[in-house]
Image (cartoon, grey):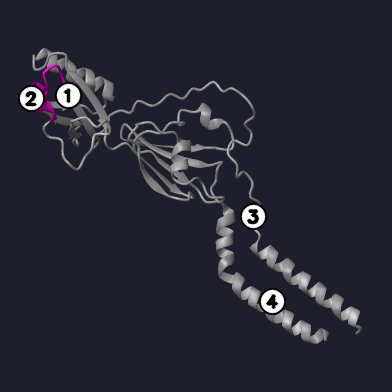
Amino acid sequence: MTIIHKYVSRKVLAAAVVSVLISLFSCTSTKKVTYFSGLQNDTLNSVNVVPDPVIQNNDLLSISVGSLNPEASVIFNANYPRSAQDPSGNTASAYLVDAYGYIQFPVLGNIKVAGMNKYKLKELITGRLIENKLLVDPVVNIRYLNFKVTVLGEVNKPSVLSVPSEKISLLEALGLAGDMTLFGKRENVLLIREENGKKISRRINLNTQELFESGFYYLKPNDVVYVETTKAKVTNSGKAIWVPAVISGLSFVAIIAGQVIK
C-alpha cells in the first residue's frame, strides 16, 4: 500500500470515528425552544386582570386597623407575632384562617372569612367596628402573608416564591425561577390551582399567544407551575450511561485499524 493510500485510509477512519461520536452526542432536534414564536407585531386585547383571590382555610392574613384615635386602635393590633412581617410595614395582627374558615378577631369575636375576598372582609370589619361604636372612621388594611407560588421541573432554579406585592404573572414566576432550561417543554406547561376545595389543572402553550388570551396569565396564591422535560433530555441521559463504553471501543478499533494500515 502506498504512502498516499495509507494517509487517505487513516483520514477516512478518523472521519468515521468523528462522525460516530458526533451522532452519539447530538441531541434530538430542539424545536420550539423560543417563547411565543408565532407572535408578530400586534396589539392584543388583554382579557387578563389581576385575580382577586378568595380567602381559604389555612390562609395567613395580616389585618391592620387604624383610626383618628391611635390608643383606641392598639387593641386590634396587639397580637402581631414577631415571626411574621406585614409587607406594608404597618403595625398589624396576623390571623390564621382555621379549618372551618374563621378567624378570632379582637372584640368582634369569630368572623367567617373563607369564601370572601379581602375587600369584602375589609368592608365587613369596618362596618362592625362602626356599628359597635368601637372606632371612629376606622381604616382597615388586609394583606396575604402566605401569597406564594411554586415553580418545579425543567427550570434553572426550582423555587417556592413569596409574592409580597400579591401580583405575579406566570412569566415573572418562570423568570424568578431562572427561566426554563433548553429541555423544558414550552408548548406544554402545566398549571395546578386549587379553588373551592378542587384541584384545577391547565396545559399552556408558551409557543403561541394562548397565554395572553387565557385567564391564567396572572397566578393565584399556592399555584404550582410544572415544566415537563423533553424527550431529548431523557434520550441524552440514557446515552450518558453507555457512551463512555462505546467511545472506549471505538478508540480500540481505531488503534487496531491503524496498525493494520501501516
- Residue at label 1? 65
Are the residues tagged 3 and 2 within 8 Å (C-beta)? no
Which mark is first along the chain, 1 or 2?
1
Q: From the image, give the main secondary structure of the stretch colored magenta.
A: helix
Name the residue located 11 percent from the left edge and 13 percent from the top edge: 131
Which residue is labeled 4 in the image?
250
Marked residue nearer the N-terminal end (3 or 4): 3
What's the CA distance linking mark 3 and mark 4? 23 Å
Label annotation for residue 107: 2
Query: Mark 3 or 2, which is nearer the eye?
Result: 2
- Horizontal placement of 143 versus 18: left or right? left
Q: Are marks 3 and 1 in contact (CB under 8 Å)?
A: no
> Counting residues from the N terminus, which is met first, the one under dot 1 or under dot 4?
1
The secondary element bearing badge 3 is classed as loop
Local crowd size for mark 2, using a 10 Å CA cut-off: few (<14), some (14–19), many (≥20): few
What amino acid is at disc 3?
Thr
Q: CA distance from mark 3 to mark 1?
A: 59 Å
Quadrant of residue 65 within the rendered picture: top left
The quadrant the C terminus occupies is bottom right
In the rendered structure, which segment of residues is drawn in magenta?
A: 65-77
The residue beneath circle 3 is 28
**Is residue 228 shown above or below 142?**
below
The correct choice, above or below, for 81 with respect to 248 in the image is above
Circle 1 Cα neighbour tier, 10 Å, few/some/many (<14 / 14–19 / ≥20): many
Image spot of residue 9 (x, y percent) = 84, 77
- Label 1 residue SS: strand
Q: As rendered, which of 120 and 87 lies closer to the eye?
A: 87
Measure the alpha-carbon separation of dots 1 and 4: 76 Å
What kind of residue is marked 1? Val
Q: State how far apart marks 3 and 2 are (Cα).
A: 66 Å
**In this view of the protein, can residue 227 be seen by the observer?**
yes
